[in-house]
Image (cartoon, rainbow, N blue to C red):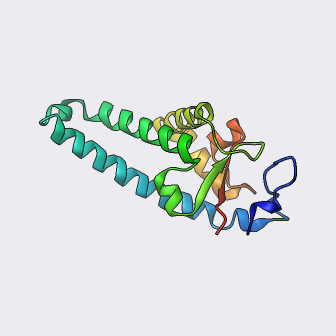
Amino acid sequence: MSYSNLTADLHLPDPVAQPEFYASVPTKRLLAWLIDSLLILIFCVVALVLTLGIGFFFLPALMLTVGFVYRTATLARGSATWGMALMALELRRHDGARLDTLTALLHTLGYSVSMAFVIPQVVSVLLMLTGQRAQGLSDLVLGTVAINRRA
C-alpha cells in the first residue's frame, strides 16, 4: 500500500477502489483509544505524584486537561496519537493532507464533546462501524478520516 494511490489533487482514497486504506480501521481505533487512555492515566498519576497529591482534588479536571493537551499535541505533530501510531493509523484532512494544529484542536474538541454525552458517542461509534470510510461524528463534521499508514 502506498500513498501514490492518492489522486494527484490529494483527495482521500476511495473506500471501494482502495479498501486497504480502511481495512480494520474501527478495530484499530478502539485499540488505539485504549492505549491512549492508558497513557493519559499514567500522565495523570505522574502529575499526582509531582503535585504531592494535591492534583487528586482536581482529578476530573486534570484528566480532561491532560487528555485534551495530549490528543491535540500528538495529532498536530504527527497526525496521529501515540496509540494510533502504534496501530499504524493516521488522520487525514478532506484534502488528503495531514492535520494542522487548528484541525487537531477542533478534532480533539469534537471528540471531547462527543465523549461528554452518550448519544453523540453512540452515534459516532455506529458511524465508524457502518460508514464506508469508518468516520466518527467529529470526522464527518471536519471532513477528516483515519486511514492505515503505509507499511
Tell me what residue is drawn at x 81 percent, y 56 percent: 6
Using the image as rendered, state which of residue 75 and residue 140 is in the foreground: 75
Q: Residue at x 77, y 66 (%)?
A: 19
Q: Is residue 7 above or below residue 151?
A: above
Q: Position of residue 32 (x, y in %)?
A: 49, 58
Q: Position of residue 12 (x, y in %)?
A: 78, 51
At 47% from the left and 56% from the top, the residue drawn is 83
Coordinates of residue 29 in the picture (x, y in percent): 55, 57
x 66%, y 45%: residue: 98
User: Can you say which quadrant of the picture contains the C terminus?
Assistant: bottom right
- Give the vertical position of 58 relative to 91 (above or below): above
Horizontal side of residue 20 vs 106, given as left or right: right
Number of numbered callouts drawn: 0
| Quadrant location, the N terminus | bottom right
Q: Is residue 54 left or right of residue 142?
A: left
Query: In the rendered image, which quarter is residue 62 located in?
Result: top left
* 54 w.r.t. 8: above or below: above
Can see residue 76?
A: yes
Image side of residue 45 versus residue 130, left or right = left
Residue 72 image offset from top left, x and y in percent: 50, 38
Question: Which residue in the rendered view is the most extreme toward the right?
Answer: 8
Q: Is residue 30 something that shows in the picture?
A: no
Is 109 in front, or is 43? 43
